[in-house]
Image (cartoon, grey):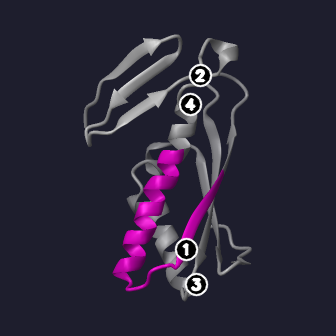
Amino acid sequence: MELTVKWENGMAFSSETPSGHTVRMDANETVGGHNTGARPTEMLLNGVAGCTGMDMISILRKMRIEPDAFHMDVTSERAEAHPKRFTKIHIEYALEGDLPEEKVVRAIQLSKDNYCTVSNSLNAEITASYSINGHKSNRII
């Protein structure tokens, strides 16, 4: 995969992805940006969530089940010293529908351990938990 990221002005950069989408990044005003785009760290967390979310839907469909609704809440911790890398990322998978818990857990494990390219490219501790139809599990995966 290749792409070109161009400096626009201030702290703003943009790129066109290989799939043809434009992405804009910028910093906040306190560090010379104009807040015209997402922060690279925000995009990284979005990438982790998007990647595992797509895995989840694909895996659940292969199991012949599909959630009625699905969202993820992502929390993270970063090191205090530069480069301030992510040290922990937690993904709370919230699914609605007629979903067998063991299949949801299996889909999370498969995404986390085998399929999600983005999360497996990081060295942060990545954990997951889940809720099905609003019933939160105490299980950390």
The residues tagged by marks 4 and 3 sit, at their Cα atoms, a distance apart of: 35 Å
Task: Give, as a three-letter code, the residue at label 2.
Answer: Ala
Q: Is residue 135 within the magenta segment? A: no
Which residue carries the number 3 mark?
101
Q: Are marks 4 and 2 in contact (CB under 8 Å)?
A: yes
Q: Quadrant of residue 141?
A: bottom right
Question: Is the residue 110 above or below the residue 36 in the image?
Answer: below
Give the label, 2 or 3, closer to the camera.
2
* Residue drawn at 58 percent across, 74 percent down: 95
Which residue carries the number 4 mark?
39
Marks 2 and 3, the one that precedes in the sequence = 2
Marks 1 and 3, the one that precedes in the sequence = 1
Which residue carries the number 1 mark?
69
Magenta residues (range): 46-74
Q: Residues within 10 Å of mark 1 (few under 14, many from 20)?
A: few
The residues tagged by marks 2 and 3 sit, at their Cα atoms, a distance apart of: 41 Å
What mark, if any, has residue 27 been given in the picture? 2
Q: Are marks 1 and 2 in contact (CB under 8 Å)?
A: no
Question: Is the residue 31 above or below the residue 96 in the image?
Answer: above
Does residue 96 appear to the left or right of 63 in the view shown?
right
Q: Quadrant of residue 82?
A: top right
Marks 1 and 2, the one that precedes in the sequence = 2
Q: Position of residue 36 (x, y in %)?
A: 55, 25
Give the label, 4 or 3, closer to the camera.
4
Q: Are marks 2 and 3 in contact (CB under 8 Å)?
A: no
Task: Give, as a three-letter code, the residue at label 4.
Answer: Arg
Give the label, 1 or 4, closer to the camera.
1
